Amino acid sequence: MPTIAIANQKGGVGKTTTAINLSAALGELGRRVLLVDIDPQANATLHVGLVPEQQERTIWTAMQMVAGPQDSGELQQQDLRQLLDSLWEERPFPKDGVPITKRPNGNPFDLLPSNLELSEADLALAAAVSRERRLATVLSAITDYDYIIIDCPPHLGVLTLNALTAADAVILPLESAFFASKGMNQLFRTVLQVKQALNPKLSIMGILITRVDQRTTHSRQIATEARTALEKRVRVFETEIPVNVDLADASAAGMSVLLYSPASKGAACYRRLAREVEAVYATQAH
């Protein structure tokens, strides 16, 4: 079951748009998809038609259930025998502890929602044991999906580290109007550090060039320069995501662009991206 993080430390690059619409495009292909919102801004939750503040159980609720020995008051009350028993006892994360919303607003995927309470994570997990593995532990209880897509926050904090530690692969959206090699190098280094220290299976699936405005020479030129500079080191998806009013309108309507405007250019692009993602895993299987 592939788990794919959509990550970039810069906001406004189409990260959430990609997470939602890639999930929808894979769902349209008949794949069982879970979208995980691990951003305290909860844009993915909001843009699939839910009200974040009304979500009583979220990804943060589940992550708080993963107790380590430094942050569980119960362990301080146990005697030596109980502590030793706890040390050797395997406790899989309970599946009913994962608050999944089925097909929110008719979208062809399920959602593990977020809200602003998730902003507590950086402070709450500061001294916690295995703080980077909380999300991986939660997702270990989930076995009935073909894909898990994780929408990351627009910064490289503990929540993004959790996503990269839980993922098999990461897709990096890159806005065509703003290609900065320094910023990409920082993100590459973070992925490499996570791979070396926390998650040996992690790989960069590819760069996705987004917000391409075909009306402007500058946007097209930057997209070409980014592709030329990066494809020597990493896959750059053939699909490019255009500036498209239907993408913005679909988000405002609380649904994917494939549901909101199936015949739009934005929908066609995310269908192509889904086929590229499927092709990556088909190649790896042979």
Image (spheres, helix red, strand yellow):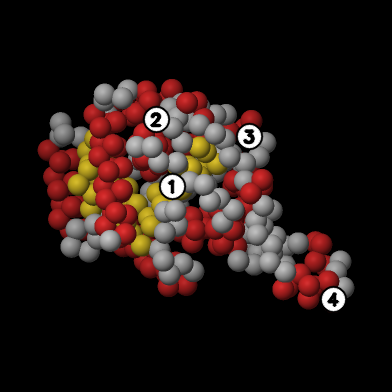
**Disc 2 residue type?**
Ser
Give, as a three-letter code, the residue at label 4.
Arg
The residue lying toward the viewer, choosing from 73 and 269, is 269
Q: Are marks 4 and 2 in contact (CB under 8 Å)?
A: no
Q: Secondary structure at mark 2?
A: loop
Neighbours of disc 4 within 10 Å: few (<14), some (14-19), many (20+): few
Q: Residue at x 80, y 66 (%)?
A: 75
Quarter the C terminus occupies: bottom left
Residue 125 drawn above or below residue 152: below
Real-space Cα distance between discs 2 and 1? 19 Å
Whole-number angstrom distance, CA of label 1 to CA of label 3: 25 Å
Q: Are marks 1 and 4 in contact (CB under 8 Å)?
A: no
Q: Which mark is residue 256?
A: 2
The reply to whether residue 13 is visible in this rendering is yes
Q: Earlier in the sequence, mark 1 or mark 3?
A: 3
> In terms of sequence position, does the residue under pointer 3 or pointer 4 come before the other?
3
* Amino acid carrying mark 1 in the image: Asp
- 284 or 87: nearer the eye? 284
| Discs 3, 4 touching: Cβ within 8 Å | no
Q: Quadrant of residue 128?
A: bottom right
Residue 18 placement: quadrant: top left
Q: Look at the image and tell me whether residue 62 can be seen.
A: no
- In the rendered structure, which disc, 2 or 1, sits on the residue that comes first in sequence? 1
Residue position marked by numbered label 4 in the rendering: 81
- In the drawing, what numbered circle is on residue 146? 1
Q: Secondary structure at mark 4?
A: helix
Pinpoint residue 260: horizontal percent, then vertical percent. Answer: 37, 23
